[in-house]
Image (spheres, grey):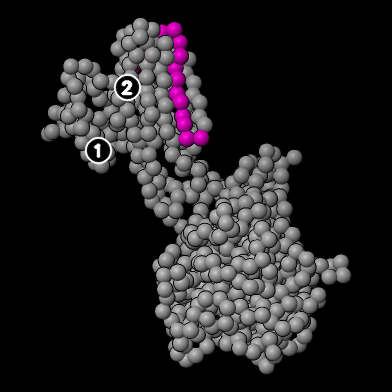
Amino acid sequence: MVYKKLLALTAASSMLLNVVPSNGSIASAQQNESHVENKLASTNSAEQIMNAVLDDVPEVIGAPNIELEVQVKLDELAKGKYTSLHASFHIPDSLTVTGVEFNSKNIMGGASSYTYSKDNLNLQVKGGNVSFAHKGSDLFATIKLKVKDFVTSDRTDVIRTNSITAESRNGKDIVYSVDEAVANIGLKQLDTDAIAKIPGYANSLMSHKFGADPHAMVYDGRVYIYMTNDEFEYDANLNLIDNTYSKINTVNVISSDDMINWTDHGAIPVAGPNGAAKWATQSWAVSTEHKEIDGKDKFFLYFSNNASGIGVLTSDSPIGPWTDPLGKPLIGRNDPAAQGVAWLFDPAGFVDDDGQAYLYYGGGVPGNPPTQEQAEHPATARVIKLSDDMIHTVGEPQVIDAPFLFEASGMHKKNGQYYYSYSTNFSGVRQEDDPGTGEIAYMTSDSPMGPWTYEGTALRNPWVFFGVGGNNHQDFFEFKGQTYITYHAQTVAKAMNKAKGYRSPHINKVEYDENGKMKDVKADMKGVSQVANLDPYKRNEGETIGWNAGIKTEKSQAPGSMVESINLNVTDIHNGDWVAVSQADFGKNGAASFEANIASTVGGEIEIRVDSPVGEVIGTLDVNPTGGDQEWQLMETNVKHVSGTRNIFFIFKGEGETNLLNMDYWKFMEKE
Ligand SMILES: [Ca+2]
Ligand SMILES: [Ca+2]
């Protein structure tokens, strides 16, 4: 067999020592065979070439803190007087070095040490008479590594060798050939049952329910996202149908102070028989603003009653409860402010730095079918001043002539400039500089009421990024000094194979060029980085979710922490379902115990793992029945010492088809 012959040749010329596959796999043997052939072809028989080899690691679970080892194997050093043996490696971003184990059997006459910073690892042996000889193996050192973060698709990362050199006293330094000293690390995405927002992704913001037309409000260090509550609609035969939007009369709200872990505050009852505004039938595309009035922070939720009116609700908190202060639309179909507006909807409130508030609204393309002029200049968006109490309009509206306007008015301010953004229509013929269809375009002005200068587009249609299209709706906002865009895409529905107009919220970063133009947003599932750690020692809601599989949330009868009457719990919990939070900071002392507020009729257990669903189990909370799905009990268990910043996965275990338990909130107790 060719392979064996080559092996013999190789050994004879002492040019390659690691031809025996370390893991015994065929793939590895074949790799080594071709490796030998390559080596032979390039060998200059007149001089001895010293070789170094790194072992491949073919299958590594791509999850935080998964450990792996890479062996560094070297040819023997010929006899001589060496003062050092030095090896330098490039470590890919996905891995971090946790240690190096030198093979003291083979290394003599020197002290071994290593340095590691960023992507560079240096190994060295220094001394008066360094030698490296094979005593039972060709192993020089074992590099110990771990995976930094979730790998979101299978890939191969590479550890490369920059150089390996033995310095000689007589100037005859040995430079190893490092052509083959490359370790291919096969990183495998961890298979979980998470939908769309897989561990490691920030988008969509949630996957246990839908949410469209997202609007962001930043208040007291948190981002609140308000969304049209898309829910599956079925026909009489219980077949899933396209979203008609006709049944939507609630608004989903979630919040986060870190952009990965989102707390579900439930659905605000806005319109319909159970809504705050009983005159309204729908609640689409809301905008929420806050303003200090008479020394108190007040909250205002502007909503679309389908496309026939704009209403406003008020509250003392960002999550409710909400009341209707007018008992009628803020802008009704027959109001002067509605004249010339095709679709009377999509309100965007905006409070300027001087306290003056404005409302942007409207949309639609006149004409059936529209002329080119009507498509290009629908002139159906408006801006009007709001009164000091935020619940009345003041004066006449101004027309906003946005090119190819469709809907989704938005307003944000940056460096004194006003940015009016909107979604473009699907009508008319486009010239080169015109926006595409269903894209987010924008205009600027140095006044909140115009005149406006068209700037271009900022976000392409979701189809471009996610392979699933439809309309879009955006809001630009600033949080902790960074501008972001929130928008929707049918990514969760697509992952469920049910992309029928049911939309999910996303956030990506926005950058400006030196002239204040917004650069093209790169929308993706990876999304934004976490901007703060989660504190595991405070009350954390069960419904604060980074990632999840198989669960739902529901209104809870247990008291809420922000507003007593508003609280949710995690439910629909079955064996193997899980919820997780990203990057909890356990600090130096670490955790000693864990407690959770639980209700259960059948019982089960909560397995607490760190890092990932296959990470270390630090404790298990046994859940005994409490006598009902809303009969709440605080339950506690000790946990193994865990410190530093770690993901926490709560993995539910139990038997049967029914809901095992409900979880309201949890917290860890810090070690004294
Ligand atoms: Ca379930
Ligand atoms: Ca709760």
Q: Is residue 60 above or below residue 164?
A: below
Q: Which mark, by number, is residue 31? A: 1
Question: In the structure shown, which secondary structural element does the residue marked by tag 1 occupy?
Answer: helix
Residue 74's quadrant in the figure? top left
Residue 473's x, y, as percent?
A: 55, 72
- The three-letter code of the residue at mark 2 reads Tyr
Report the residue marked by disc 2: 176
**Which secondary structure lies at badge 2?**
loop
Which residue is found at the position 41% from the left and 24% from the top? 87
Taking the image as drawn, is residue 127 in sight? yes
Q: Specify the principal SS of the magenta part.
A: strand
In the image shown, does 599 or 184 lie closer to the viewer? 184
- Residue at point 57%, 82% (across, down): 379
Marker disc for residue 522: none
Q: Nearer the viewer, residue 605 or 114?
A: 114
Q: Nearer the viewer, residue 524 or 644?
A: 524
Closer to the chain start, of discs 2 and 1, is 1
Task: Give the vertical position of 278 relative to 40 (above or below).
Answer: below
Whether residue 571 is visible, yes or no, is no
Q: Quadrant of the N terminus?
A: top left
Disc 1: CA contacts within 10 A as few (<14), some (14-19) or many (>=20): some
Q: Is residue 662 left or right of residue 377?
A: right
Specify the segment rendered in magenta: 118-137
Question: Which residue is rendered at x = 43% and y = 81% of the image?
Answer: 428
The answer to whether 329 appears left or right of 117 in the picture is right
